[in-house]
Each structure stands twice: as structure tokens, then as C-alpha cells.
Amino acid sequence: MKYLLFLAVFDGLGKLGEGDTTFGKALIIALVSILIVFIILALIIGAIKIMEQFFKNKKAEAPKAVAQEKPQEEKNLEITDDDMMAAVLVATIDYANETKKDVRLKSVKRIG
């Protein structure tokens, strides 16, 4: 009980556990404690709302550039043998290294 002295925020409440704590004093301490908790919760909620607005604005800017590059319908790739698979992989990796971007293989066409 003596460790609950931090709740006695008003003058004249006395030390807890000395016998002079009445129901009214205990009620005041409880209400002040509850008020402190709700104030801190309101501050946390406010901070989260501010961060949500900040990050929502950041996310809204990014999709504008990506929205212009809508992928076309994906086609089934017809790779018939291991040599064709190796050629496709090498060509895709080489293109990705040249452009320094993520690439997606959309179709394969056999030449010759």
C-alpha cells in the first residue's frame, strides 16, 4: 500500500495505509487516475491519427506513377524444352541488368 503514494496528487489526502484514508479520498484518487489514463489514451490516438494522415499522403503519391503502367493480360508461356527455358531466363536477366528495374516476362516468341 505504501507504494501507491504516487496517486495522492492532492494536498491533504494523507498517506495511504495510515488509517485516515476515507472513501471520499479514495474515490478522488481513483477518478484522478482514470482521468490521467484517458488523457494519455487521447494523446496516443491523436498521434496515431496524425501519422495516419502523413502516411496516407505518402501512399497517395506513389500509385500515380504506377497507375500509368497497367499490365496487359498475362498470356500462357509455351516453353517446349530446356534450351528454350535457358534462353528465356538469360534474356530476362540480361534485360533486368541493363534497365536496373524489375521486369516481368509477358510472352515468348520463337524466332527462326
Image (cartoon, rainbow, N blue to C red):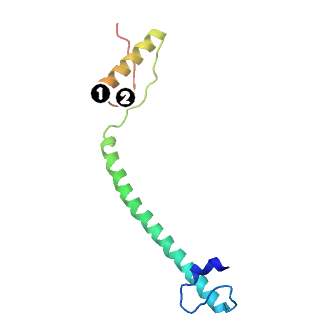
Q: Describe residue 31's horizontal placement relative to residue 87 as left or right.
A: right
Nearer to the camera, 22 or 2? 2
Residue at the right extreme? 19
Q: Amino acid at mark 1?
A: Thr
Q: Amino acid at mark 2?
A: Val
Q: Which mark is residue 103?
A: 2
x 39%, y 16%: residue? 90
**Circle 1 residue:** 99
Q: Position of residue 62 (x, y in %)?
A: 33, 47
Instruction: Give the spatial CA distance, label 2 vs label 1.
Output: 9 Å
Location of residue 43 (image quadrant): bottom left
x 45%, y 14%: residue? 85
Q: Describe residue 33's horizontal placement relative to residue 97 as left or right.
A: right
The vertical placement of 83 against 73, above or below, is: above
Q: Position of residue 72 (x, y in %)?
A: 38, 32
Q: Position of residue 48 (x, y in %)?
A: 44, 63
